[in-house]
Amino acid sequence: KRYPFPVHVYEIINHCDTEAPQVASWGEDGRHFVVKDITSFETTFIPKFYNPIKYTSFVKQMNNYGFVNVSRLSTSERDSRREYWRHDFFVKGEIEMVKKIQIQKKKFSRQRETVESLKG
């Protein structure tokens, strides 16, 4: 069975959390995750669990599924490339909740429907 994108992300984060926490890991609360090494995440771990895509495409997919980038602004060079992500249904140990995450409808499509109905 082909799983939706968030399930693959969940698998990547679980794997990294135990095998490569220097690359990505769950946050202490289990309600967010951190990508710490974007290059390794993109070149090694995304292709292992999903289609090989650039990190920028990963970010677009995250946004499409309603994930929020909650990265903290950091003055330190070392932390400047870390990205913190969260979604209400993306919780450590809760794969059934992750499976409920759906792609978000585009905002402009609703606007287009409104314009079309006004033309009617």
Image (spheres, grey):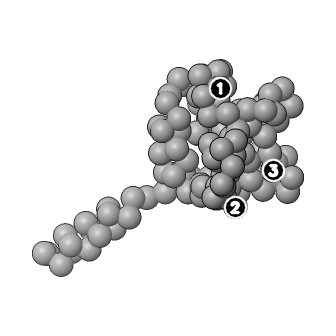
Viewport quadrant of the N terminus: top right
CB within 8 Å, label 1 to label 3: no
Point out the residue furthest to the left here.
Answer: 119
User: Closer to the N terminus: mark 3 or mark 2?
Assistant: 3
**Residue pictured at 49% horizontal, 30% vertical:** 54
Viewport quadrant of the C terminus: bottom left
Q: Secondary structure at mark 1?
A: helix
Residue 27: mark in rendering: 3
Q: List x then y, in percent, for residue 5.
A: 58, 39
State whether residue 96 appears in this view: no
Q: Nearer the observer, disc 1 or disc 3?
A: 1
Dot 2 crowding, Cα within 10 Å, few <14, some 14–19, many 20+: few
Q: CA distance from mark 1 to mark 3?
A: 19 Å
**Residue that numbered label 2 is attached to:** 88
Dot 3 crowding, Cα within 10 Å, few <14, some 14–19, many 20+: some
Q: List x then y, in percent, for residue 36.
A: 70, 39
Q: Nearer the observer, disc 1 or disc 2?
A: 1
With 54 as the anchor, is 3 left or right in this view?
Answer: right
Q: Secondary structure at mark 3?
A: loop
